[in-house]
Amino acid sequence: MKQGKQDVELGRFLSLILRHNPGAVGVKLDANGWADVEELLAGLRRAGRVVDMDILERIVRENNKQRYSFNEDHSKIRANQGHSIAVDVELKVEAPPEYLYHGTAARSVDSIRKQGITKQSRQHVHLTEERETAARVGGRHGKPVVLTLRAGAMHRDGFIFYRSENQVWLCDHVPWEYINVK
């Protein structure tokens, strides 16, 4: 189901709060990135957003990137990955598929050639099993380039991979020798 414009805007605001700046609405995240739902709803109201539990549940359920999760009783909410603040979202170590993809802008390829793919301000490098998703992500930053990563070889060489609740593959760094530009 396609989200309406207001839901997309609210989803982006939630992303800011739950991944980067919970203080924007006066909430706190615990060590695992969870925010109290009632505290979040009150903070959203203080920020001028008309949001109730039904709307919040719809945003979590219908977000096209499945960025958010509730705990079992829906009393807490968190972003699944992509934080620029230090939280432990309890990622599980998993063996990746043989190949994963990373989308970037063409202007970034020279830097990646020198440093590999770095996490920059985030806690992890974000990777996907879908070439189309990588192209879409790369296109947000300019002319897209899809990098093919030999993730299976990295894993066999001792690199650790995680998969988030919303199926994004994560690792700390991807050295250039494991990357093919196509």
Image (cartoon, helix red, strand yellow):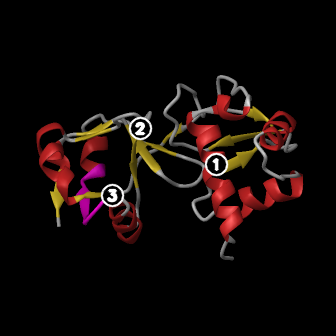
Amino acid type at mark 2: His
Which residue is tagged 1?
Answer: 13
Look at the numbered disc 1 and give the secondary structure of its residue.
helix
When asked about the image quadrant of residue 46, the answer is: top right
Which residue is denoted by mark 3 in the rendering? 141
- Amino acid type of the residue tagged 1 in the rendering: Phe
Neighbour class for label 3 at 10 Å: few (<14), some, many (≥20)?
some
Instruction: Give the mark nearer the N terminus: 1 vs 2.
Output: 1
Q: Nearer the viewer, residue 151 or 110?
A: 110
Cα distance in 3D space between marks 1 and 3: 20 Å
Quadrant including the C terminus:
bottom left
Vertically, is 80 above or below 122? below
Q: Which mark is residue 124?
A: 2
- Residue 104: x, y in percent? 29, 56
Tag 3 secondary structure: loop
| Depicted 73 relative to depicted 1: above or below | above
Magenta-drawn segment:
141-151
